[in-house]
Image (tube, rainbow, N blue to C red):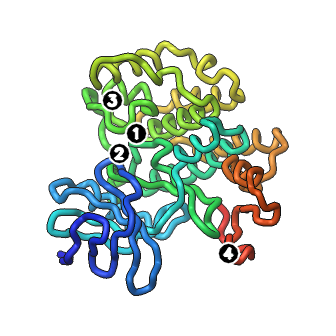
Amino acid sequence: MLTSSFQGSKGGKWGKYELAKHLGAGSFGEVYLGIDQNSGEQVAIKLEKKENSHLLLEAKLYRILGKALGIPKVYTYGIDNEFNVLVLELLGQSLENLFSLCGRKFSLKTVLMIMDQILNRVEYLHENNFLHRDIKPDNFLMGIGGRSHIVYMIDLGLAKKYKSTSTQLHIPYREGKSLTGTARYASIATHLGWEQARRDDMVAVGYMMLYFLRGALPWQGLNAQGREEKYKKIMETKMATPLEKLCEGAPVEFVKYFRYLSSLDFEERPDYDCCRQMFKDLFKEEGFELDYQYDWLVKYNNNSPRNGNRLKPGLDRKSKHRIRTAGP
């Protein structure tokens, strides 16, 4: 067990890390900006009450996933007197925050660039025998500095192992499960109480991309008394919305994507390569350039008062020299 004088508030310390600023809240705890007092490096520090266990499970899963592209680096984790603590690589803004910054609409180009990376992250998680089970814009953050073009997957507190590492046996199909995750992006199967599988994470990715393209999903803003009624109305709206209507105004590839996922059996492995290639072909047909000029960068650059101080992916803002990074 790690011990410290950490008090869980600004100015508190945990080992060599000091809390500097509250950044926000995750699914089960608070997130702070921290400072490594030895190196001066900025980090992210996540806290949750000790009686919970999500954060330590998340830390162990990050360690299982290793130093992969788009997975935040873990510096350390442990238990304080009152809190579970996880110290992570500091990242940039979430896709939800950037979505709001861009007037709650993303261009098709931006959606396709981030979707390709997110499908990569989800596949990598699945190949390590885990489901995310809470795919949503708040759980994908952009990197900073030389990795500002990379989409990171975070918040694995609801992740679940769906396959044994030793035997490769899939968990059994069950019904009567309570909804785990965020109702807005949950698959209809999840609403129905079916055990989640790989296909459900993939459906959530599709809903999230349509959210970015449309600006909202048809089941948002429903009037309901309490959570149970809200979930019921969301499910009913999803079931009543034809796929063509849901994808209206979006390229036909999104209809094909959802139809393909609906054809998968519970234990069936999605063809990630095929899904990515379909959207890569669309990207090419649209004549887009893979320059990582996301909508928020274009917005910032267009509003920049100084023409020569434009931000570009892969550039260090201070030195303005390109940093070599592995592509997503």
Amino acid type, label 1: Ala
Q: Nearer the viewer, residue 317 or 277?
A: 317
Q: Earlier in the sequence, mark 1 or mark 2?
A: 2
Q: Earlier in the sequence, mark 4 or mark 2?
A: 2
Compute the Cα span from label 2 to label 3. 15 Å
Q: Which mark is residue 170?
A: 2
Indicate which label's residue lies in the foreground, 1 or 4.
Answer: 4
Q: Which residue is mark 3?
A: 194
Q: Earlier in the sequence, mark 2 or mark 3?
A: 2
Amino acid type, label 3: Trp
Q: Earlier in the sequence, mark 4 or mark 3?
A: 3
Q: Percent x, y for residue 58?
A: 33, 58
Which secondary structure, mark 1? loop
Q: Nearer the viewer, residue 223 or 27?
A: 223
Q: Nearer the viewer, residue 128 or 297?
A: 297
Which secondary structure, mark 2? loop
Q: Which residue is mark 1?
A: 197
